[in-house]
């Protein structure tokens, strides 16, 4: 079987993912991107757009990572990759500190300096970005994204595809609904529903997410 991880996405997020995969001992073989212009990203060739995935699978590549920041698109592409027969690997930087009782799904990005504590659950295709903290007993839904230096206290629930911006915080036990966005530096002190945008300290709802 052909070795090496196929990456979907050729932007800045992909660069961080590539370095995390390499630091964890993986070889990154090829990139497919919406912009199929031939080029290299950190030495990895871009060989086409996602129409090339079926051919790569036919060549024997089996491992794939979706390095796309957009939560909905990442979830969609992850589903497509699975349908083609790829296994979603996770990109976990060796400097991350992950409790042995934490449960991580497939296709998860855990960047440098992250801490994930006891009995927390991270759903498939989630991004835990650089320096983020997930304390004990948190439950993070599929394809959510914690931005750099975001921090969750114990027992926080994050819905699918929710996004917490750089430095956002959540106090113990709160729930943030699916598809909700918390602006950079926002502090969540009460439950928030699905599909809203909340900003500030404390975070207040400013509108619905389109």
Image: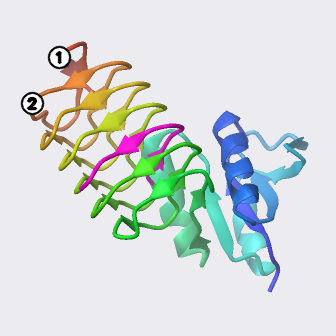
x, y (%) of residue 48? 80, 52
Circle 2 sits on which residue? Answer: 190
Identity of the residue drawn at 77% across and 70% down: 56
Q: Is residue 77 left or right of residue 124?
A: right
What secondary structure is found at the residue carrying circle 1? loop
Q: Does the magenta portion include 13?
A: no
Q: Quadrant of residue 63?
A: bottom right
- Tally of numbered tags: 2
Residue 15 visible in image: yes
Q: Is residue 9 above or below residue 181?
A: below
Q: Residue at x 68, y 42 (%)?
A: 16
Can residue 76 be seen in the rendering of this structure?
Answer: no
Contact, mark 1 vs mark 2 (Cβ under 8 Å): yes
The one of 134 and 123 positioned closer to us in this rendering: 134
Q: CA distance from mark 1 to mark 2?
A: 9 Å
Q: Is residue 135 magenta?
A: yes
- Give the residue pinned by disc 1: 202
Tag 2, which secondary structure? loop
Q: Say few, some or many: other residues with alpha carbon within 10 Å of mark 2 (under 14 / 14 to 19 / 20 or more).
A: some
Q: Relative to the observer, which residue lies in front, 26 or 31?
A: 26
Which range of residues does the magenta coloring cover? 126-136
């Amino acid at each position: 079987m052909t070795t090496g991880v196929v990456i979907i996405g050729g932007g800045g997020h992909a660069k961080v993912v590539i370095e995390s995969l390499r630091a964890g001992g993986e070889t990154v073989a090829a990139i497919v991107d919406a912009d199929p212009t031939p080029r290299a990203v950190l030495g990895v060739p871009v060989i086409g757009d996602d129409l090339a995935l079926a051919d790569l699978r036919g060549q024997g590549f089996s491992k794939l990572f979706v390095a796309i920041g957009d939560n909905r698109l990442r979830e969609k592409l992850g589903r497509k990759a699975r349908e083609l027969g790829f296994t979603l690997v996770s990109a976990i930087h060796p400097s991350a500190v992950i409790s042995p009782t934490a449960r991580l799904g497939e296709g998860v990005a855990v960047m440098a300096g992250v801490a994930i504590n006891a009995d927390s659950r991270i759903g498939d295709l989630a991004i835990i970005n650089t320096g983020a903290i997930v304390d004990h007993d948190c439950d993070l839904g599929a394809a959510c994204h914690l931005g750099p230096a975001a921090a969750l206290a114990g027992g926080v629930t994050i819905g699918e595809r929710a996004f917490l911006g750089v430095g956002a915080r959540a106090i113990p036990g709160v729930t943030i609904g699916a598809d909700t966005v918390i602006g950079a530096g926002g502090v969540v002190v009460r439950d928030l529903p699905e599909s809203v945008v909340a900003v500030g300290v404390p975070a207040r709802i400013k509108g619905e997410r389109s």
